Amino acid sequence: MMDVAALAGVSHQTVSRVVNGTGKVAPQTRERVLAAIGELGYRRNSVARALVTRKSGILGIITTTSVHYGPASTLVAIEVAAREAGYFTGVTALEDFSRESLTEAIDYFLGLAVEAIVVIAPMTDIAEIVESIGAPVPIIAVSAANAVSIDSVRFVRGDQLEGARMAVRHLIELGHTDIAHVAGPEGWFESQIRREGWLIELRAAGLPIREAPYGAWEACAGFEAGKRLIAEGLPTAVFAANDLIALGLMRAFWQAGVSVPDEVSIVGFDDEPASRYFQPSLTTVRQDFTDLAQNALLAIRDAINGIGDAEPIVRPTELIIRDSTAAPRH
């Protein structure tokens, strides 16, 4: 900055006012300063400035290395919402969500003077660690966890429990009385909550409950589960924990000559873009990741400004009825 001031023939305070857009500077003086900046290739030290002003315009995002639709869509939606709100983002993806690695990631972002940190936390241990670590900046956890926000961590989530219940209620209202569930992996909030929604509705309706062991999010898991269900005795309907599992089920049933939905109905979860092109098109539960991200940014703004309460933000899910569900044949 001193070199710019010397070349432009002004004080360093004048250079600071031009760079930061504060105070009054005569137009001809501003032009001289900008010309000197261009000649010297000056770049302001945003981090140093942020340490003083506490306004870096940067958000840190910590996510998993998972490429599954939910976490990946959440990440993209948050980055887009952040840019629309005037923030740049830094992203780190952790494979090992230990307390040590998460603390290291948070410390790294604090060194960049971020204004807030967003943690995409689909697994149970992540949310628990985030709650226990804390930080001098707001932390927003985008997580299906049924957690209570605290001063240092605010939670934003889609209402996946109600989404799962809507899916199963839809099948019950169609007349199904034998409804299986193919769960996602153990240790993921989404798996636990979607399975819980299935159980709640079956118990409320007094219907029998089949075993529903935890599995994986991939289509191959749905394919293997479909073969198992055929061997055990085909249910009239299946609630799949995500759309890829539903796709695997469809393949297994097609291979065995079982018609969907004539012989078995299937409901998925997430409403992946391809789900409408499955054969038949998939009835599923939609999560609005754009809406989720926008509400995460609202939570960040409120936390930075010290307004609002720390109650979790819960956003609705929506049942999308397509061609993979129908009344059972009697």
Image (spheres, helix red, strand yellow):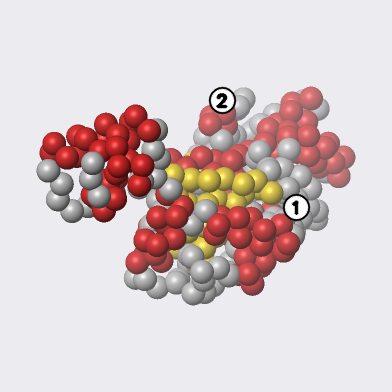
Residue 240 versus residue 170: which sits nearer the camera? Answer: 240
Residue 61 versus residue 78: which sits nearer the camera? Answer: 61
Q: Which mark is residue 277?
A: 2
- Amino acid type, label 1: Asp
Residue 325 lies in what quarter of the image? top right
Q: In the image, is residue 104 above or below residue 326?
A: below
Neighbourhood count class around disc 1 (C-alpha, 10 Å): few under 14, some 14–19, many 20 upward? few
Residue 255 versus residue 7: which sits nearer the camera? Answer: 7
Dot 1 falls on a residue whose secondary structure is: loop
Q: Is residue 166 visible?
A: no
Per the image, the residue denoted by label 1 is 96
> Number of callouts in the render?
2
Is residue 220 toward the left or the right of residue 28 in the image?
right
Q: CA distance from mark 1 to mark 2?
A: 35 Å
Residue 271 versus residue 137: which sits nearer the camera? Answer: 137
Is residue 47 toward the left or the right of residue 17 in the image?
right
Identified at 54% across, 41% down, the residue is 73
